[in-house]
Image (tube, rainbow, N blue to C red):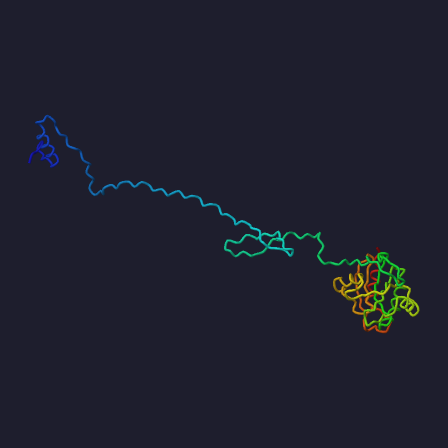
Amino acid sequence: MPTTSGRPLTSLALAGFVCVILTAGSGAVAQPTPGPPPAPPGDKPAQPATPPQTKPTEEPAPPAVKPERKPHPARDDSGKPEDRTRPEVAPDGKGVDVFTEKPEDKSKKPENTVSPYVLNHTVKDISGKDVDLSTYKGKVVVIVNVASRCGFTAQYEGLQELYDSRKDKGLVVLAFPANDFGKQEPGSEAEIKEFCETKFKVTFPMFSKVTVKGENKHPLYTQLAAQPKPIGGEPKWNFTKFVVDRSGNVVARFDAEKTYVGTAQLEPGLIKKVDELLEVKQ
C-alpha cells in the first residue's frame, strides 16, 4: 500500500492521489469536492426546523339583537285598539303574556254612577204649587212615602213628634203620598191633606201624590232607587225613609219595621242617624 512519510494512505487520500495523476496531463489539477463533515459518532442526524404555526384570527361575534316590541292588537269595549304593548319574551320562550296598562285617568268619573245629591228636583206640594227641593239644602231632610190606610199610618204621629222636637236644629220631614202598595192611598190631595191635619196635626211639608216604584216612578224616586246598596232600591212598602244630610246627599235608608205596625214608634236607627247629622254644622 502506498505510504506518505512512512504512513499508509487512507482510502480517501488514495482516491485524491489517483485523481491528481490522471489529470496531470491536461495541465489542470482537479480539486476534490468537499463533502459534509462526518457526524460525530453516536449523534443523530439533525432534523429540519419546523416553522411555528399560527392560529387563524377569529372574527368577533355579532352583538345580540333584542326582539322588537310590537303592539298587541287588543281592543277595548268600543272596538278601538287599546294603547298596550306586549312585553319581551324570555330567551327560553317561557314569557308571560301580560300587558302594561296606561296609568288610570282618575279625572274620569266611573260610568253609570248616580249622584247622591237628590235636592235637584222640582215637585208639587199638596196644594199643587211647585217647590224647588234645593231650598231645603242646609237642613237634615227625611223623605218618606206615606199612605192613609196602612198599618204604619200611625207613624204620622211619630214623624210629627220628631219634626217638632228637632225642626229648630235644622230638621225637615217631606211626605210624599203614594198609592203603590195595597192601594192604601186612594184619596185625592185635598182628602189626604184634611186627614193628616185633622187626625195627626201634621205641620211638616206634604206633597202631591207620586209613584214611587215601577217604570212610571217620580224622577226623585228614580234617583233614590238608583243609589248603591244599602241605600238604593225601590221602597219595599209605605213609610220608607231616606235621610239626606245638610249638603243634600242621601246618606241612609230605613224601611218600616213590622214590629212597629199600628204604633207611632219610629225606627231607633232613624232617630240616631238624624241626631248624628244635626250635630254636623255646615
- Residue sitting nearer the eye, 105 or 145: 145
**Residue most toward the top?**
27
Image quarter for residue 31? Answer: top left
Where residue 93 sits in the image (x, y, percent)?
Answer: 51, 56
Quadrant of the frame with the N terminus? top left
Where residue 115 sits in the image (x, y, percent)?
Answer: 77, 58
Image quarter for residue 278? Answer: bottom right
Where residue 140 sits in the image (x, y, percent)?
Answer: 84, 60
Q: Is residue 87 left or right of residue 111?
A: left
Q: Is residue 91 left or right of residue 84?
A: left
Q: Is residue 6 above or below residue 213?
A: above
- Residue sitting nearer the eye, 244 or 46: 244
Q: Is residue 275 above or below residue 49?
A: below
**Residue most toward the left?**
1
Where residue 165 sits in the image (x, y, percent)?
Answer: 89, 64
Image quarter for residue 159? Answer: bottom right
Q: Is residue 127 left or right of residue 76?
A: right
Quadrant of the frame with the C terminus? bottom right
Q: Please tell me how many numbered marks the rendered image carries.
A: 0
